[in-house]
Image (cartoon, rainbow, N blue to C red):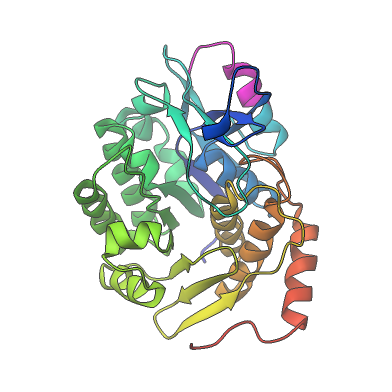
Amino acid sequence: MAPRTGYDVLVLGEVLVEIHADTALREAADGTPARISYSGDALNAAAAAAAAGARTALLAVVGDDELSVPLLHRAAALGVDVSHVRRAPRPNGAYLLASDTEGDRDFVYWRTHSAGSTLSTRHIASWRSLLTGTRALITSGITGALSPSGRDAVVAAVETVHDAGGLVSYDPNFRPRLTGRAEARELLARIAPLTGLLKTSCPADARALAGTADPRTAAARYRALGARTVVVTAGADHLLLDDGTRACFHPVPLNPDPVDATGAGDCFTGTATARLALGDLLADAVAYGMAAASLSTSGRGGTGHVPRFAETATLAAAHRASGPTGGRG
């Protein structure tokens, strides 16, 4: 990748206040204990990219409520540059969740008229010099589904980075409570040809966006849209990597004591994108992404445990040494 003069990784998206309950949401009752943290797919990915060694900045709009200051302090403490974050006279979006070791999406969100939904092409224009100077951009279908202006902002940012020669990393992250299948597919079709890395899930995303529950078929359909490299996560224990020359399943390193899988996919995306931006080969970047995602499940919430790169590299090396990393199966 050609030398760049700005950030290694920019992450465009939404930051959320996270309210983490101590019991399953359907069993929550009066007096159920909970704690406040900060997450959202953009913050999760940005924190992982920073931990993986990339100079990382967050491009987002946050609110003017009392939680904005600790929210930004948390992002900065995770190593993410928040100096380019914009403010809006709206509340921050929030969500409630319970511990989740399997990656299920049984969350409750409050994001109508949130600050994050005001993201627009006006913001993208103000960040243009950052976008043309970055090595990589991470964004998602969630960001594009928050509002029509958010959708336009995602497209504008992706086009700017792609045209400047940077790597675009995109996760469709389909959320039926935010958008319909037709709209998500339309955005995916527009973004996919501009991506260097498209990370998605199966069966959730694949059924909605590719019309299949088979990871290999899903990857082929995403590549037919123009995505250069596709990673399909298929449960907690393996993923499919399709780089256009072969489609290969890879087992994910085992975490013997998982606590919560929230944000694990974002951790993969942030780590893998960061390592690609720093010059690693695709196979190495994916191996680091898998290791970081597995380690991240040791903490509660989206940023409960963001592994240091030394920890990630150690697990990736041990996993490789333990045997074959995949096959054509």
Q: Hey, which quadrant is residue 128 in on the image?
A: top left
Query: Is residue 188 shown to the viewer in this render?
Result: yes
Left or right of 165 in this view: 293: right
Q: Is 118 contained in the magenta span?
A: no
The span shown in magenta is 63-73
On the image, the x and y values in percent for residue 153 come to: 32, 37
Left or right of 291 in this view: 43: left
- Image point (52%, 37%), residue name: 40
Q: Nearer the viewer, residue 59 or 128?
A: 59
On the image, the x and y values in percent for residue 118 come to: 35, 24
Left or right of 229 in this view: 223: left
- The vertical placement of 311 against 122, above or below, is below
Query: Is residue 6 shown to the viewer in this render?
Result: no
Q: Is 69 contained in the magenta span?
A: yes
Q: Nearer the viewer, residue 287 or 2?
A: 287
On the image, the x and y values in percent for residue 200 come to: 43, 60
- The vertical placement of 166 against 86, above or below, is below
Q: Hey, which quadrant is residue 78 in on the image?
A: top right
